[in-house]
Amino acid sequence: MPAQLEPGVLYVSEEFETAAHLCACGCGSKVRTPLGPTEWQFTNHPQGPSLRPSIGNWQRPCKSHYWIDRGKVEWSTEWTPEQIAAGRAAEERRREHYYAELYPDRWWVRVWRWLKSMMSS
């Protein structure tokens, strides 16, 4: 990734499975999105790039929320703190399910689940 990102450009490194861009709202924040089966998906269409799921900049002052679809930014609504927490929990469940399916008999998967249950208690 270049040190200086240009507005309106989505930078993608397939080698390092990551994408980066400047926040679409214009605040100048760098947004980095990991790419992979449990993270964001990058698709390059003839009309332009797409990144799924949406980008929610909940930790930034702008709190912008948008989609990058075929080279265009599509704005979405700002989420409430409850929606953000629910979205994060759903992401974690998808990751857990993906890795449990990938490595069902691995002892460390069971240990990880047990540790997570102890920390959330």
Image (tube, grey):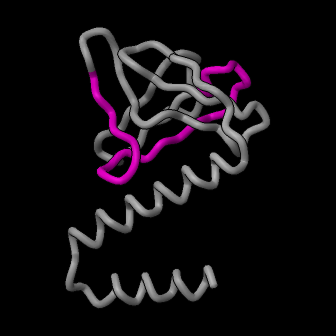
Q: Position of residue 38 (x, y in %)?
A: 35, 53
Horizontal side of residue 7 vs 1, given as left or right: right
Q: Nearer the viewer, residue 8 or 62?
A: 62
Horizontal side of residue 21 vs 69, given as left or right: right
Q: Is the residue 60 above or below the residue 99 in the image?
A: above
Q: Splitting the image into 4 quarters, where does residue 96 fall?
A: bottom left
Q: Is the residue 35 above or below the residue 62 in the image?
A: below
Where are the magenta residues, as a range? 22-44
Residue at the extreme right of the image, as rendered: 61
Residue at image point 40% right, 89% down: 111
Residue at image point 72% right, 48% down: 81
Q: Is the residue 116 above or below the residue 88 in the image?
A: below
Horizontal side of residue 12 vs 73, given as left or right: left
- Quadrant occupied by the C terminus: bottom right
Residue at the extreme top of the image, as rendered: 47
Residue at image point 46% right, 13% down: 72
Q: Position of residue 15 (x, y in %)?
A: 29, 45
Q: Position of residue 101 (x, y in %)?
A: 22, 69
Q: How many marks?
A: 0
Question: Magenta stretch: residue 86 in it?
Answer: no
Q: Nearer the viewer, residue 47 or 94?
A: 94
Q: Position of residue 27 (x, y in %)?
A: 73, 24
Question: Magenta stretch: residue 32 in it?
Answer: yes
Q: Is the residue 109 above or below the residue 10 in the image?
A: below
Residue at image point 29% right, 63% down: 98
